[in-house]
């Protein structure tokens, strides 16, 4: 099975290697491609937000980000070894970019965070062309962000504004992103990769309990996570 739908939202049944391969071929093809990292909060939001649902539908690749989406996708026959998260995708993607000569741009997070991650990725991948800017999803910041992007002309753009702002921003930019072949919404990935926010231990991620760790670290997430039980119930009802 190549792809499935979780409560109407498309999820591509691809693991990390296949995701990297698809991203590479998007750059080779040219044109503009949105890559979304779909988690249960995305799915629940898309049910009530037609604009977000439309943008997700326009994505070239919808990765299963989070065990809740992997669980739902597997129930429908999708064979996935596990989630493909933005945090896990970025280091091998940077290595691919270095190898293929693709320029990478990190946009978003608090001032200094993307710069620090760019320095780390550069140190890990000599020869990588990587630039960064914190930017903002607010239209008042568009001019400066577009000027910085025009100076770099990245092939791959990672946008860390959180969902749905990052996907809506990429969609709003349309054809204005100079040279960008792939734009990926990566949520809080820059904060994790620079160690600003600790990540759940591997065993917790493996048993699908990462949400509990995130809640303990960032209790303000409770409002966003409140949709998770309803998500589980809807998936069980829809695909029983
Ligand atoms: N962020 C930003 N500008 C904004 C709102 C958020 O750069 O106007 C960044 C924020 O600093 C964080 C990321 O977007 O790095 C959102 O992280 P979160 O973990 O909330 O996203 P999720 O992965 O849950 O979508």
Image (cartoon, rainbow, N blue to C red):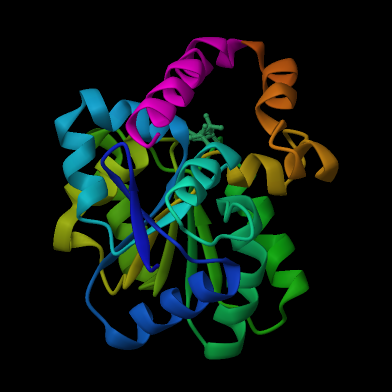
Residue 153 in the image: state x and y as whole percent.
35, 73
In the rendered view, tell whether residue 15 sits above or below residue 64.
below
Q: Is residue 177 magenta?
A: no
Q: Quadrant of the C terminus?
A: top left
User: Residue at the location (21% across, 51% down)?
Assistant: 57
Q: Nearer the viewer, residue 149 or 137?
A: 137
Q: Nearer the viewer, residue 146 or 125?
A: 125
Q: Is residue 226 magenta?
A: yes
Q: Quadrant of residue 22?
A: bottom left
Q: Is residue 143 visible?
A: no
**Residue lying at the far front of the rendered structure:** 240
User: Residue at the location (59% across, 80% down)?
Assistant: 96
* Image-based side of 133 in relation to 222, left or right: left
User: Residue at the location (79% across, 36% down)?
Assistant: 204
The span picked out in magenta is 220-240
Residue 139 in the image: state x and y as whole percent.
22, 36
In the rendered view, tell whether residue 84 sits above or below residue 55.
below
User: Residue at the location (16% across, 35% down)?
Assistant: 51
In the rendered view, tell whether residue 61 sits above or below residue 37.
below
Report the magenta stretch's main SS: helix
Residue 122 in the image: state x and y as whole percent.
69, 70
In the rendered view, tell whether residue 190 sits above or below residue 227.
below
Q: Nearer the viewer, residue 83 or 92?
A: 83
Q: Is residue 67 visible?
A: yes
Residue 236 in the image: state x and y as whole percent.
43, 29
* Image-based side of 149 in relation to 14, left or right: left
């Amino acid at each position: 099975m190549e792809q499935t739908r979780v409560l109407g939202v498309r999820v591509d049944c691809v693991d990390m290697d296949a995701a990297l391969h698809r991203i590479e071929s998007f750059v080779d093809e040219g044109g503009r491609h949105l890559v979304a990292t779909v988690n249960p909060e995305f799915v629940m939001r898309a049910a009530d937000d037609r604009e977000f649902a439309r943008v997700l539908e326009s994505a070239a690749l919808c990765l299963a980000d989070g065990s809740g989406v992997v669980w739902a996708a597997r129930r429908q026959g999708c064979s996935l070894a596990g989630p493909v998260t933005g945090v896990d995708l970025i280091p091998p993607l940077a290595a691919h970019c270095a190898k293929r000569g693709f320029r990478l741009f990190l946009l978003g997070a608090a001032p200094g965070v993307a710069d620090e991650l760019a320095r780390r990725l550069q140190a890990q991948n000599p020869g990588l062309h990587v630039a960064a800017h914190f930017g903002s999803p607010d239209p008042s910041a568009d001019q400066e962000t577009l000027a910085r992007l025009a100076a770099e002309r990245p092939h791959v753009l990672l946008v860390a504004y959180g969902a749905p702002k990052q996907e809506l921003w990429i969609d709003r930019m349309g054809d204005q992103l100079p040279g960008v072949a792939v734009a990926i919404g990566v949520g809080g990935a820059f904060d994790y990769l620079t160690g600003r926010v600790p990540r759940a231990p591997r065993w917790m991620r493996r048993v699908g309990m990462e949400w509990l760790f995130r809640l303990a670290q960032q209790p303000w997430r409770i409002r966003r996570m409140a949709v998770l039980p309803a998500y589980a119930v809807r998936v069980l009802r829809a695909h029983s």
